[in-house]
Image (cartoon, helix red, strand yellow):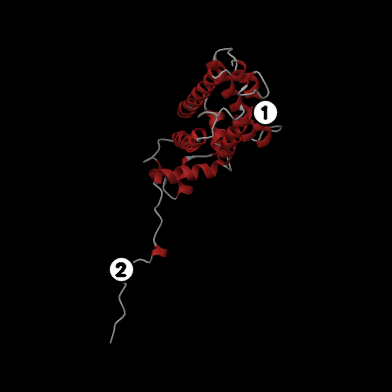
């Protein structure tokens, strides 16, 4: 008589557990969920820990304060956004001579806003607290510095190609664009009355970039090159 094969101790593939996130990541997930309901000023470590399913004491094994956790959340969100800027079609990476600057910028700006929008409550707090909270200031100013450097390099590239005219210091132009975008987006993220929609943000940022960098609405990327022949 044949006996059935025993499977005691074996786990069916369908029942296999998915790998759990590290606890510090679960804390950041919990904080982001809570920020969609209340600002940092209304939150304490206790509800953040409870949302993450841990004790208050356990929270302090990973972060020194709620602001330390927010700074870590900002860094994580920005790291997740980096592929947007590094995308092969990103204006920051480069631009094919056949692609008009306005098209390249529009695609990049819209993609960046789409990626940031689900995290707008985190970004709201970053924009609001960076002047008052040292941990947040350091994290946010690093974000601004990285973004400004990317803008500066792209502006210098367009000038070298002869598509953007030489003009005022590229670094200062980059800083102006980054900080202007930060303030405009903050109004939307904080849901301030009269703030722009996602679509309006993209359109206004696009116009500002075109007029400040290219001094034109839609310059011909091949125009100068043809003129030199």
- Residue 218 % position (x, y): 66, 25
Q: Going from the N terminus, do you reach mark 2 or mark 1 first? A: 2
Give the residue at the far front of this rendering: 229
The image quarter in which residue 8 lies: bottom left
Name the disc covering residue 167, or none: none
The image quarter in which residue 214 lies: top right
Does 67 appear above or below 148? below
Task: Give the quadrant of the N terminus.
Answer: bottom left
| Label total for image | 2
Who's the residue at 52% across and 19% down the image? 156
Q: Name the residue under label 1.
A: 204
Give the CA separation, mark 2 to mark 1: 61 Å
Between 83 and 22, the residue placed more toward the observer is 83
The image quarter in which residue 181 lies: top right
Who's the residue at 30% across and 75% down the image? 6
Residue 12 appears in the rendering? yes
Q: Name the residue under label 2.
A: 9
- Residue 189 % position (x, y): 61, 35
Task: Decide: few, some or many residues near mark 1? Use Cα within 10 Å; few <14, some 14-19, many ≥20.
Answer: some
Q: Is mark 2 on a helix, strand or loop?
A: loop
Residue 186 appears in the rendering? no
- Residue 77 % position (x, y): 49, 37
Between 95 and 212, the residue placed more toward the observer is 95
Q: What element carries label 1?
A: helix
Task: Decide: few, some or many residues near mark 2? Use Cα within 10 Å; few <14, some 14-19, many ≥20.
Answer: few
Who's the residue at 57% across and 35% down the image? 112
Between 187 and 129, the residue placed more toward the observer is 187
Is 137 situated left or right of 163 in this image? left
Task: Give the quadrant of the C terminus.
Answer: top right
- Residue 202 % position (x, y): 64, 32
């Amino acid at each position: 008589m044949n006996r059935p094969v025993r499977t005691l101790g074996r786990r069916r593939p369908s029942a296999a557990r998915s790998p759990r996130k590290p606890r510090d990541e679960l804390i950041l997930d919990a904080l982001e969920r809570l920020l969609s309901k209340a600002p940092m000023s209304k939150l304490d470590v206790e509800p953040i820990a409870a949302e993450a399913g841990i004790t208050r004491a356990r929270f302090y094994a990973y972060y020194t304060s709620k602001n330390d956790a927010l700074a870590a959340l900002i860094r994580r969100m920005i790291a997740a956004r980096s592929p947007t800027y590094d995308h092969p079609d990103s204006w920051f990476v480069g631009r094919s001579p056949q692609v008009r600057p306005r098209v390249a910028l529009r695609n990049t700006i819209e993609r960046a806003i789409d990626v940031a929008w689900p995290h707008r409550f985190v970004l709201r707090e970053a924009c609001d607290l960076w002047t008052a909270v040292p941990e947040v200031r350091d994290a946010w100013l690093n974000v601004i510095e990285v973004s400004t450097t990317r803008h500066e390099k792209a502006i210098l590239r367009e000038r070298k190609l002869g598509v953007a005219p030489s003009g005022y210091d590229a670094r200062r132009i980059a800083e102006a664009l980054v900080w202007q975008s930060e303030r405009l987006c903050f109004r939307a993220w904080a849901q301030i009355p009269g703030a722009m929609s996602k679509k309006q943000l993209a359109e206004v940022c696009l116009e500002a970039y075109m007029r400040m960098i290219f001094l034109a609405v839609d310059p011909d990327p091949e125009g100068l090159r043809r003129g030199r022949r």
